[in-house]
Amino acid sequence: MPHCRYDPAAVLSSYRKSHYRFSKQPNSGKFNIMAAKEFTWSGFVVRLIAALFLVFATYNPGGYSYYHWLEGTLPEFDPLMAIAGVCLVIGWVIFLRATFRSLGLFGVILASALFGAILWLVVDKGWIAPDSYTTISYIVLVLLSAILATGMSWSHIRRRMTGQFDVDEVEEN
């Protein structure tokens, strides 16, 4: 019976090779390997913009959202509305699944509590009126987007802070 030996260095090397991409350095003609999944602030901003688009496309107090579009045309429903709705659901599934896998339920509750406390501070300091529905709605939507973007980025941030990798699936060869 052959002896199977687990080699952590080989596994890590295999992981690194499969998660790196090649990029061409400008004006040099040479290629270098750069991590495809490193955390950068620009990457976080892209995730935040995508989350803002998803949240505000679904609903916003300005009246220009899928919710308002659907509300204004019901009971009629056309294929374009169906396609837009399915695209929004796909976006929500991607963001929510990544957020819950990265932060977990407890992390989502803590992030919500933190952002809720920020909203409370803003109202308590008198920076916005407590009866300003529209302003508070916009702030809540931005904070929800921030939670989703943080969830999408958290595995990268955690790896950068601690050096630990989150592994969801293991490939067996």
Image (cartoon, rainbow, N blue to C red):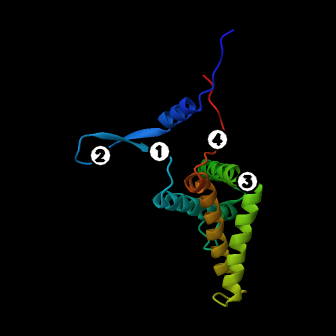
- In this figure, which residue is indicated by the disc labeled 1? 36
Disc on the earlier residue, 3 or 2: 2
Find residue 56 and report its horizontal and vertical position in percent: 60, 65
Q: Residues within 10 Å of mark 4 (few under 14, many from 20)?
A: few
Disc on the earlier residue, 2 or 4: 2
- Distance, label 3 to label 2, CA atoms, is 38 Å
Q: Name which quarter of the figure residue 171 lies in.
A: top right
Disc on res. 167: 4
Q: Residue 102: in sight, yes or no?
A: yes
Disc on the earlier residue, 3 or 4: 3
- In this figure, which residue is indicated by the disc labeled 3? 104
Q: Kindly indicate whether the residue at mark 4 contacts the one at mark 3 (C-beta within 8 angstroms).
A: no
Disc 4 marks a residue whose amino acid type is Val
Disc on res. 25: 2
Disc on the earlier residue, 1 or 4: 1
- Distance, label 3 to label 4, CA atoms, is 14 Å
Q: Is residue 163 above or below residue 168?
A: below
Disc on the earlier residue, 1 or 2: 2
Find residue 91 and report its horizontal and vertical position in percent: 61, 51
